[in-house]
Amino acid sequence: MNLSIRTFDSLLDVPAAEWNNLVPDDNPFLRHEFLAGLEQYKCLDDHGWYPAHQLAWSDETLVGALPLYVKTNSIGEFVFDWSWAEAYEQAGRHYYPKLVSAVPFTPVTGPRCLVNQQTANRQDICNKIYNAARQFAEDTGVSGLHYLFPDEAECLQLAEDGLLKRKACQYFWFNHNYPDFGAFLQTLYSKKRRQLKKERRTLRDAGIKLEILHGNEITPRHWAIYHRFYTSTFYRKWGEPRFTLPFFESLSRTLPEATLLFMARYQNEYIAGAFAMKGSETLYGRHWGCSSQFKFLHFELCYYQTIDYCIQHGLKKLDAGVQGEHKISRGFVPVTTWSAHWIANEQFRHAIQNYLEREHQYIEDYMNDLSNHLAYKAV
């Protein structure tokens, strides 16, 4: 197959239907509506993400794509390389700009190279796109090319091409065909089960009311209230919020079937909200915020409500975001995530490789230790 691979600095120039034909059903963050929405509604502005997407065409048909960004910082990536950047700077070199294939501000595992699953020569197309991305990196003189949160098979494929593998850990909840939330609780140690019941009862006794809104039920008023909660969390902890109010509002129009808000009321006023998206098998809990502090409210909205939603709707797993060892005592388990890295400078490549080998063993030991402290009763 003869391919023409071109660099696009905006997905707004790519037909949505053609792009979405490449995207798997279980990852709404890769859909055109989400990625192009980030550009259209100014979520990338002033945050160091500059689109340089690699698109592969056969004649006039889009057959493959790689979401790719020129990065001038490491903000919003969740694969932390600040120490690498510091070492580069200390050596008198420039770590930025670099190239990153990822979903901005979204640490969700999924394919980076997008090719329709039914395509017979899928791997050949991916290989040509990977090569084009490497050539683009060399031509632009960036310090490296980084694939963040690919699935394991893709990471191994990239490693065969000489990229460095990096292992990390997140925490997922898995649905073992529970008929209801109570059946899930019965699989936990009694101490953990009592704690979860206590936390949920505390909020009920306080008069907290909960509701779940799907995309087509979320009004501009709901989004405005939730956006205040969301931005307040960033201002308290991380600085500048990433997602704009018009971007959130757009999801109700463009991805209503994938968009959810979990909201909490107290005395008839909304006091907290959590944003989530869903694919065909997975619920992805993303951001939360509140205007009033109630003990256990975060756990209820971000974990127990989302777990219950997975059970009721037959979803296989819950990805509640990065970090948070406290998830282990609430029924989550450690899972491996990956990234793959091409480093232009050979000397630094070897140094980073040595670092990653040591880090890999630490992550293995850490995950093994966590597995000894799960909330589930021994079978």
Image (tube, rainbow, N blue to C red):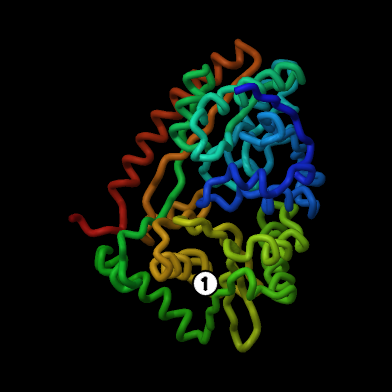
Residue pushed farthest left? 379
Picture coordinates of residue 23, whole percent (x, y): 57, 45
Picture coordinates of residue 216, whole percent (x, y): 64, 72
Picture coordinates of residue 285, whole percent (x, y): 53, 59
Quick check: 39 above or below 114? below
Q: At x 73% / y 62%, what residue is drawn?
A: 250
Residue pushed farthest top? 347
Residue nearest the observer in this picture, 148 or 205: 148
Left or right of 256? Residue 9 is right
Using the rendered view, name the quadrant where residue 292 is placed.
bottom right
Picture coordinates of residue 195, whole percent (x, y): 35, 70
Quick check: 151 above or below 248? above
Quick check: 354 above or below 260? above
Q: Which amino acid, by three-letter code, is at mark 1?
A: Leu
Q: Secondary structure at mark 1?
A: helix
Residue nearest the observer in this picture, 84 or 106: 106
Give the quadrant of the C terminus.
bottom left
Left or right of 245? Residue 78 is left
Q: At x 28% / y 47%, what residue is drawn?
A: 372
Kindly tell me whether residue 38 is visible in this rendering.
Answer: yes
Q: At x 69% / y 33%, what residue is drawn?
A: 55
The residue that mark 1 highlights is: 297
Q: How many marks?
A: 1
Q: At x 66% / y 33%, what residue is drawn?
A: 100
Give the quadrant of the N terminus.
top right
Using the rendered view, name the quadrant where residue 76 is placed.
top right
Residue nearest the observer in this picture, 42 or 266: 42
Give neighbour class at mark 1: few <14, some 14-19, many 20+ (Cα, 10 Å): many
Kindly tell me whether residue 87 is visible in this rendering.
Answer: no
Left or right of 5? Residue 358 is left
